[in-house]
Image (cartoon, rainbow, N blue to C red):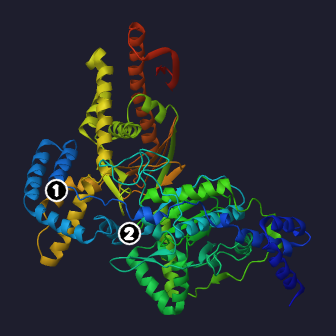
């Protein structure tokens, strides 16, 4: 037995006496002149401290709440048809609408009833889940496009620093999230103010008007990969995994993250392992095998079989089963959206459920594979680990790493590719470069007003942003936009999302009023705009309420369409005419794909339609932060953003003018009760307009 081992054994017994005595001993022995002692004592203190391993503690198991969530209701067919027709009235001319009405009537009283009965029977047999879950998952796994198109990346907004320190803190906090999730002790996400119409579900303790969300999607967050197969992929989750996979310069490493007992390794050990990887002075890999994951799914499925046949099956298994993927980029991430989404070729494994990306400049991002979750759970995951890093970082500097040696848990995976696979890698890298060159991005921060002003005007902030999108599009392109917004149904068991069309009759009429010559309405223009904006807002709130409570129509018709396709394949029957009607196809060819997010800087998405614009926005209290992207050369994002900004200002000015007139009425009529004109709040809207609000007393 070595002298150090003997001392360590004695010290371990002494340290178990009490936390106070352990702290005293650590202070006495931990010094730069004896790094071995310092490393051991740091290891012991972190491993034995429960707070090092967990994000948060709850008195009640999360699984207990999960089991009692309400199930997503199947809407009545007649309600779905009614909502479908109402949503399309504003988008179709009279002839097209009459034809759609006839098709819908025939479907509702004929084939639709058969499909509805089949759906109800299927839902009754699957009480453990939602009636939409399997069909939505299939819609992702059946797609044959490259995952570069469907994956989404998020800039985390963490304060940048050393790449090594940022990566270590991210790895430790994600490991804490993993252990807290595994223990069932996570604080569940809430619906952000949306409540069930029937009052069922669990009310959030922090938000009385919110309901707790289903957390089942997080079961696929760790140890999960999308395995490519021809015709349909497979979502594979492996339990009991202790390692993560690290990509750097095209090399692929596996690193232990948990010890044999499932506890997180000390941050010093994790940092030493990552330092070892970053310090390797090897040139970039000439033929990085990770590039193959960017290919179309059928192509990658065939290449993966070839890799397995050539003896690389065990290496692929280590990658695919890893808890998550850490990408240590050799390029900066700041203001480089393409790098977050696509990398540089060979430094992303697109099949992994989550990839954590740390740039050379210390900026951070995360990329998610979309089939297993919707964005709300991804945001929840990011917010939790971001708060953990900000409140209690595992490491703050990398000075101590000079004393440390990497553990034997670091392994570089070797891939000896034959000429055919080398050619495939070159082709995949070229295809990835073509895809990454397609999208353009534009960031807009509208600072004239935000949710505080809009709520003070009595309108929905989200409805105003949607109205401005429609108004700007009509001014730019001369016709109304098909805008389909997504809403979470996560307050139901295994709920995913519902979609609804925001181009309502009220919104389009409001756009026409804004576009009309002000002289045509004279002094009544302000009153008219006020009425139209309020009507648009109320209709928008109703659509959100219906979608969030499982009473939308798009997902319902989508499932009925899937059942019709299955029946057609099995019994060689025709597809119902409603699913061939051009009106139905409008829902899947969005001009604008909006996503409203909370508490993050920017979300990056790639449009799913050639001419579409992805519009991601965060409505702050005093501003609106927007990120736009498109792959179309016919969409000028900078020009559209400027038009959007002008539209937001014009809507704000109209709301301000209404408030100014209201204040004038108050000053001229002192008998109006409950208003005290002494207290005034001033909100600047544009260079020539202010709003004066009287506090309600």
Q: Residue at x 46, y 37 (%)?
A: 642
Name the spot of residue 240 as percent of width and height, x first: 54, 79
Where is the N terminus found, in terms of image quarters?
bottom right
**Image coordinates for residue 467, horizontal then vertical, percent:** 35, 37
Given the current orientation, which residue lies at the most extreme front position? 17
* Residue 438 seen in render: no
Residue found at x 74% / y 78%: 406
Observer-nearest residue: 363 or 8? 8
Q: Position of residue 246 (x, y in %)?
A: 62, 73
Q: Which of pointers 1 and 2 indicates the residue nearer the eye?
A: 1
Callout 1 secondary element: helix
Give x and y (percent) for residue 690.
49, 21
Q: Which mark is residue 414?
A: none
Say how many tags the image has: 2
Front-most of 28 and 98? 28
Task: Mark 1 or mark 2: name the one nearer the start of the chain.
Answer: 1
Q: Outermost residue, right direction?
A: 33
Q: Is residue 236 above or below residue 371?
A: below
Q: Secondary structure at mark 2?
A: loop
Question: Disc 2 designates what residue?
Answer: 145
Q: Is residue 280 above or below residue 365?
A: below
- Marks 1 and 2, how far apart at CA: 33 Å
| 600 horizontally vs 31: left or right | left
Q: Residue under label 1, please give it.
A: 77
Q: Nearer the viewer, residue 677 or 593?
A: 677
Q: Is residue 24 visible?
A: yes
Tell me if 539 is positioned left or right of 431 in this view: left
| Residue 358 sits in quarter | bottom right
Q: From the viewer's perspective, is residue 473 above or below residue 293?
A: above
């Amino acid at each position: 037995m070595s002298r150090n081992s003997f001392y360590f054994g004695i010290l371990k017994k002494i340290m178990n006496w009490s936390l106070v005595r352990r702290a005293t001993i650590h202070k006495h022995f931990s010094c730069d002149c004896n790094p071995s002692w310092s490393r051991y004592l740091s290891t012991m203190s972190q491993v034995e401290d429960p707070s090092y391993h967990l994000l948060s503690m709850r008195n009640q198991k999360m699984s207990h709440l999960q089991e009692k969530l309400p199930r997503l209701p199947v809407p009545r067919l007649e309600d779905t048809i009614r909502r479908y027709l109402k949503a399309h009235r504003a988008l179709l001319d009279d002839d097209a609408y009459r034809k759609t009405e006839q098709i819908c009537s025939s479907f509702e009283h004929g084939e639709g009833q058969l499909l509805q009965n089949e759906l109800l029977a299927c839902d009754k047999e699957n009480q453990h889940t939602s009636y939409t879950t399997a069909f939505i998952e299939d819609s992702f796994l059946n797609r044959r496009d490259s995952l570069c198109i469907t994956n989404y990346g998020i800039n985390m907004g963490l304060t940048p620093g050393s790449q090594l320190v940022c990566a270590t803190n991210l790895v430790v906090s994600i490991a804490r999230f993993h252990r807290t999730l595994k223990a069932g002790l996570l604080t569940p996400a809430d619906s952000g103010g949306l409540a069930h119409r029937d009052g069922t579900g669990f009310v959030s303790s922090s938000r009385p008007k919110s309901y707790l969300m289903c957390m089942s999607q997080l079961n696929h967050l760790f140890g999960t990969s999308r395995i490519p197969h021809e015709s349909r992929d497979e979502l594979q989750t492996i339990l009991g995994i202790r390692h993560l996979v690290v990509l750097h310069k095209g090399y692929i490493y596996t690193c232990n993250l948990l010890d044999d007992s499932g506890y997180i390794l000390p941050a010093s050990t994790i940092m030493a392992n990552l330092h070892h990887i970053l310090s390797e002075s090897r040139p970039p890999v000439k033929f990085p095998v990770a590039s193959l994951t960017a290919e179309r799914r059928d192509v990658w499925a065939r290449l993966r079989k070839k890799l397995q046949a050539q003896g690389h099956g065990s290496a692929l298994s280590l990658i695919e089963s890893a808890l998550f993927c850490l990408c240590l980029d050799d390029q900066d991430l700041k203001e480089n959206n393409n790098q977050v989404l696509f990398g540089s070729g060979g430094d992303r494994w697109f099949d992994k459920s989550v990839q954590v990306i740390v740039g050379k400049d210390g900026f951070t991002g995360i990329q998610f594979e979309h089939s297993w979750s919707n964005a709300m759970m991804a945001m929840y995951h990011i917010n939790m680990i971001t708060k953990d890093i900000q409140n209690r970082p595992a490491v703050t500097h990398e000075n101590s790493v000079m004393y440390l040696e990497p553990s034997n848990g670091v392994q570089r995976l070797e891939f000896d590719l034959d000429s055919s696979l080398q050619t495939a890698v070159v082709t995949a890298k070229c295809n990835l470069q073509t895809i990454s060159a397609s999208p353009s991005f534009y960031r807009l921060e509208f600072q004239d007003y935000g949710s505080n002003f809009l709520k003070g005007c009595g309108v929905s902030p989200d409805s105003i942003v949607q109205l401005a999108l429609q108004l700007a599009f009509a001014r730019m392109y001369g016709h109304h936009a098909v805008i389909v917004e997504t809403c979470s149904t996560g307050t139901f068991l295994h709920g995913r999302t519902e979609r609804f069309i925001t181009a309502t009759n009220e919104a389009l009429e409001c756009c026409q009023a804004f576009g009309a010559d002000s002289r045509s309405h004279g002094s009544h223009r302000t009153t008219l705009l006020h009425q139209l904006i309020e009507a648009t807002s109320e209709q928008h709130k109703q659509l959100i309420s219906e979608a969030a409570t499982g009473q939308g129509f798009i997902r319902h018709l989508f499932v009925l369409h899937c059942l019709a396709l299955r029946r057609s394949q099995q019994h060689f029957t025709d597809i119902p005419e409603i699913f061939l009607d051009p009106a139905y196809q409008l829902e899947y060819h969005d001009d604008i794909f909006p996503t409203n997010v909370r508490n993050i800087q920017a979300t990056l998405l790639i449009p799913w339609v050639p001419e579409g614009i992805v519009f991601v926005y965060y409505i702050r209290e005093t501003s609106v932060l927007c990120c736009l992207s498109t792959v179309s050369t016919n969409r000028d994002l900078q020009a559209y953003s400027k038009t959007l900004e002008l539209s937001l200002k014009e809507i704000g000015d109209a709301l301000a003018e209404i408030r100014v007139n209201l204040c004038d009425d108050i000053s001229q009529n002192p008998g109006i009760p409950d208003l005290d004109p002494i207290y005034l709040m001033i909100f600047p809207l544009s260079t020539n307009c202010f709003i004066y609000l009287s506090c309600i007393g």
